[in-house]
Amino acid sequence: MMTSLSQRQTPRARASGLRQMQVKQEETQMPLFMDVHTLDGAVSEADVSAAHAKDLETQGAYGVSYKEAWVDHKQGKIFCLAEGPDAETVSRVHKEGHGMVADAIFEVAHYA
């Protein structure tokens, strides 16, 4: 049986951990964004790799850094993680790089 982190830690330890996560987020120079693309049908790794390469070629002009991409092959979804000044700028890199604009984009925090 799994025990959640909150069940194993005292309230003081949980508070300390939350402060550490907040500091880690504050150390990030720019906000992180996760976007979601929904495509018709299956997605190949080659197509995702080619689109990601175009993002990498385009991102420097906008101060954006695409970090990673994940694919749900069966559902035809692509998830991209990028660091950038704002959601609109992150989206612009996709639009100019390969034309596939995300259906949704969310500002996210990374807690590790």
Image: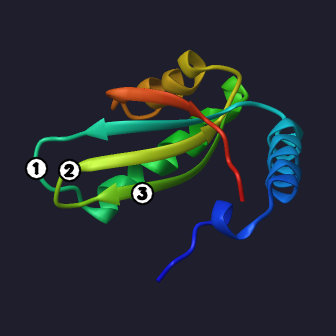
Q: Categorize mark 2 by other alpha carbons within 10 Å: few (<14), some (14-19), many (20+).
A: some
The answer to which of marks 2 and 3 sits earlier in the sequence is 3
Residue 6: x %, y % from top left: 66, 60
Q: Is residue 59 left or right of residue 70?
A: right
In front of the other: 43 or 10: 10
Which secondary structure lies at badge 1? loop
- For the residues labelled 3 and 1, the Cα–Cα distance comes to 16 Å
Q: Which residue is mark 1?
A: 41
**Residue beneath the point at 22% across and 56% down:** 43
Reading the image, the residue beneath label 3 is 70
Q: Amino acid at mark 3?
A: Trp
Asked if marks 2 and 3 touch (Cβ < 8 Å), the reply is no
Q: Determine which of the numbered discs, if any, sits on residue 76 in the image.
A: 2
* Side of 3 relative to 62 (left or right): left
Considering only vertical position in the picture, is 15 above or below 29?
A: below
Horizontal and vertical percent position of residue 64:
67, 32
Residue type at numbered disc 2: Gly
Given the current orientation, which residue lies at the most extreme bottom position?
Answer: 1
